[in-house]
């Protein structure tokens, strides 16, 4: 099974960006942390600060991967283009947010992708990525 983990804008700054909110680990360390949980799942990691690159990757993933874990960063709250890309593909996408967006600023309460993903994991820190991969693997086995 192959899963693509996409991190959107500003997540390349993990470790230095608001460590009280997003933790102390760099993106590389987060990816290593997630990888450590899986032997049988082929994980590929992608990060971009650019909406179009994320959309291209979602399109490509439809034929190359069994599922996507997506932390779209702030695009979550307003990118109808990323929403449309998720809707256009047939593979399951799980939304992840490291922080609990529900208790943060009002603009973070709305996810425009929330109803086109199979599920969302918020507020559980970087462990949310692990849970999302596990959920995809579970669904894949049941097919
Ligand atoms: C985030 C939450 C978003 O509101 C924010 O813009 C991010 C990170 C999270 O992982 O908690 O960049 O997606």
Image (cartoon, rainbow, N blue to C red):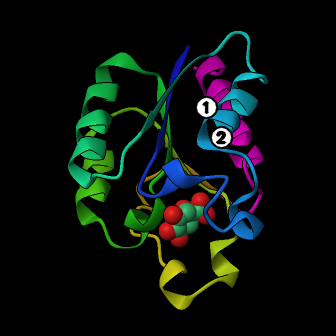
Q: Position of residue 130 (x, y in %)?
A: 72, 37
Q: Residue at x 75, y 57 (%)?
A: 23
Provide residue 138's location: percent of width, then percent of height. Answer: 69, 27
Q: Quadrant of the C terminus?
A: top right
Residue drawn at (47%, 61%), measured in percent from left and top?
Answer: 73
* Residue at the front extreme, as displayed: 16
Label 1, label 2: how many angstroms apart (C-alpha)? 6 Å
Mark 1 surroundings: few (<14), some (14-19) or many (≥20) residues within 10 A? many
Residue 93 got which mark?
none
Residue 17: quadrant of the picture: bottom right
Front in this rendered view, residue 40 or 91: 40
Judge by depth and name the residue closer to the eye, 32 or 114. Answer: 32
Task: Say whether residue 135 is magenta.
Answer: yes
**Main SS category, magenta section:** helix
Question: Mark 1 and 2 residues: CB-CB less than 8 Å, in contact?
Answer: yes
Q: Residues within 10 Å of mark 2 (few under 14, many from 20)?
A: many
Q: Which residue is mark 2?
A: 132
- Note whether ligand 1 is within 8 Å of mark 1: no
> Range of the magenta residues?
122-143
Disc 1 is placed on an element classified as helix
- Looking at the image, residue 61 lies above or below residue 39: below
């Amino acid at each position: 099974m192959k899963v693509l983990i996409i991190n959107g804008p500003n997540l390349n700054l993990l470790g230095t960006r608001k460590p009280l909110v997003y933790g102390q680990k760099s993106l590389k360390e987060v990816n290593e942390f997630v990888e450590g949980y899986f032997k049988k799942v082929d994980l590929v990691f992608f990060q971009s600060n650019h909406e179009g690159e994320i959309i291209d990757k979602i399109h490509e993933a439809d034929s190359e991967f069994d599922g996507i874990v997506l932390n779209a960063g702030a695009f979550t709250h307003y990118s109808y283009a990323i929403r449309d890309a998720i809707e256009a593909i047939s593979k399951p996408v799980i939304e992840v947010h490291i922080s609990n967006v529900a208790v943060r600023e009002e603009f973070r309460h709305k996810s425009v992708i929330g109803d086109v993903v199979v599920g969302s994991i918020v507020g559980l820190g970087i462990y949310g990525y692990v849970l999302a991969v596990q959920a995809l693997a579970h669904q894949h086995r049941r097919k």
